[in-house]
Every structure is written in C-alpha cells, then in structure tokens.
Amino acid sequence: MSSRRRWLALLFGSLVLYTPVTAFALPQVDWKTRAAARTLGVEGLQLMRQEEWEEAYDKLERAYKLYSVPTLGLATARCLEKLGRLVEAAERYREVGATKVERSDGFQQNSAVKAAQQERAILLPRIPSLEVMVRGDRGDGLEVLVDTEILPPELVDTAHPVDPGEHEVRVRRGDVTITESATLEEGETARVVVKLPDLPLPPLPPKKGTDWTPFVWGGFGIGGGGLLTAIINGSVAIRLRGTLRDRCAPDGICPPTAHDVVDGYDAARYATTVGFVLAGVGVAAGCVFFFLDDDADQIGVGPTGLQLRF
C-alpha cells in the first residue's frame, strides 16, 4: 500500500469509523466488518473527489450497509444529490440527521448529524412535486404508475415529491391504458390530468324465451277462442240480418215463417257479444300473466280460486 493510500485509510478510519467503546447509539460491529467498510469508504471518497458520483455512491452505500455511521450516510446522501436523486437524498439526510449520537461518539459523527440536518433543509425546496389527477369512471382495479413505480391510491390526486426531469405517467383500468408525460425542473410543481373514458354499459339481460306458464297460454287461448267465436257468429248474424230484410216488412214485423230466422239472428248476436267479451278478458289475463312471468311465486291458487300476491 502506498504511503498516500495508507494515510487516507488512517485518516478515514480515524474520522469516519472511530467509535468509542462507551458509545451505544452507533452500531456495534466486529473489526472485520469495520475494516471492510473502511476500505469501501476510502475508495468511495476518492471517487467523490474525481466526481465519479455513480461509482462513489455504489462504494459508499455498501460501506454504509456494513457500518451505518453518520459520516458514511452523509457521504451517500451527497452522492444521491449529485446524481439528481433528490427524493432519496432527502430521505437519507433525514435518516442521518435523526441518528442519536453522544459527545463521546466523536466530533466527526456529531458534525455529520448536524450537517445532514442543515443540508436536508436546503435541499427540500429544490425537490419538485407532481400531482396526478384521474378524472372519469375509475371502476375497479385502477392502477397509476409514475415511471415504473406504482403510485399508492392515497397519493392519487395529491402532490407528491419526485426527482427533477421527465416522468411518464400511466393510468390503467382494465384494457384501457392512458399515458401522459411531464418534465419538472427543480422546485417546480406540475399537474397531470388523465381523463378516463366512460365505462361500457352493462350487457342487456337475455330475452325471455317462449316457455310461457300455463296461465299465459290459458289467457291467450281463451282470448283467441272468444275472438274466433265472435267472428264466426258475427258473420252469421250479418247474413241472417240480410235474410230478414228480404222477408220482413219495413216496419220490422216478420211473418211466422221467419220466426226461426229471427231466433237464429238473436242467438248469433248474443254469441258474438259473448265472444268479444271472452276475447277481451282472455287477452287481458294473458298479458297480466306474461308480465308476471318472472315473479311466478306471486301467482297461486288459494281457497277462493286464482290469487295474485303483490
């Protein structure tokens, strides 16, 4: 190991990883874990000086997972901020700033906690906010995605923090997917409104078949029979009336030889009237039973005959 690298390792180990044995707020790990974290941390700091933010974050994040001390957490938050991942950076600053440390934990650890609190306060106004508003029939199973992450239902129609840059918003409802996009600068608030099409109308109920109940058949049968009786007897009455006009006087007096024709004419008229009455009653009853066909339990035979229950 070169003298410069050894010096950096010693410096980083003394400032970043030093934790007195009397400190209980910071994690207690074995010396092998501390040594591994120290190596990753030194490499991460070197990459930060070279502004290799992605590689630096990778090294420092692994070191922080091994040994979660404020100095390492502060370094990862600064890398995230440089990478434009402001939301994650603010959360890491918050996490580091909430670390409980004692004076005995070392000056550098205490300074890192205070720096995290200050830098988070400066960062928060820079974080953009995006509001996704969904209009229309949402139905069941609505899903809203911002980029590749599902937006919780509680955050729909509510502004939430996002990183600067372009974001894709997708709203899915069944087979319908609507995609919108928004580009946000630091500190900007944007709103994306997605209008969903109307839900399809529910399918019509199946048409009734021809399986009518006996009540329906009986009603229309009586009506048809009555109508047929009225037509036949009506035609007979018309024919007999013509015969009576030829055989009877103009004053309506008929000879005895025409009395049998008069009796037949009167019977035909009576039968015609009865036929029309039966036709009307039968058709009316058939219609009533037809419309009550779906509620067959409302039709029954009681002690006094046929009964309808409503």
Image (spheres, rainbow, N blue to C red):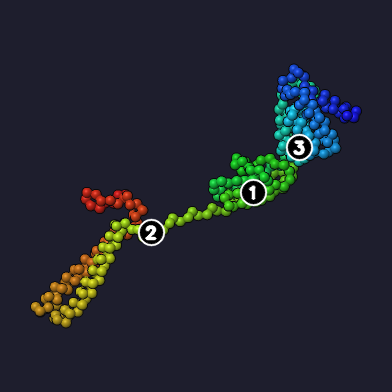
Mark closest to the chain's N terminus, 3 or 2: 3
Which residue in the structure is indicated by mark 2?
A: 209
Q: Amino acid at mark 3?
A: Leu
The 10 Å Cα crowd at callout 3, few under 14, some 14 to 19, many 20 or more, is many
Which residue in the structure is indicated by mark 1?
A: 170
Residue 80: which disc? 3
Q: Is residue 92 visible?
A: yes
Residue found at the far left of this picture? 256
Mark closest to the chain's N terminus, 1 or 2: 1
Where does residue 79 sit, x and y in percent of width and height? 78, 36
* Tag 3 near tag 2, CB within 8 Å: no
Which quadrant of the view contains residue 275? Answer: bottom left
Residue placed most toward the observer, 254 or 72 = 72
Where does residue 200 sit, x and y in percent of width and height? 52, 54
How far, Cα to Cα, is label 1 from label 2?
Answer: 45 Å
Closer to us: mark 3 or mark 2?
Answer: 2
The 10 Å Cα crowd at callout 2, few under 14, some 14 to 19, many 20 or more, is few
How far, Cα to Cα, is label 1 from label 3?
Answer: 26 Å
Q: Amino acid at mark 1?
A: Arg
Picture residue at 64% right of the left edge, 48% below the top: 170
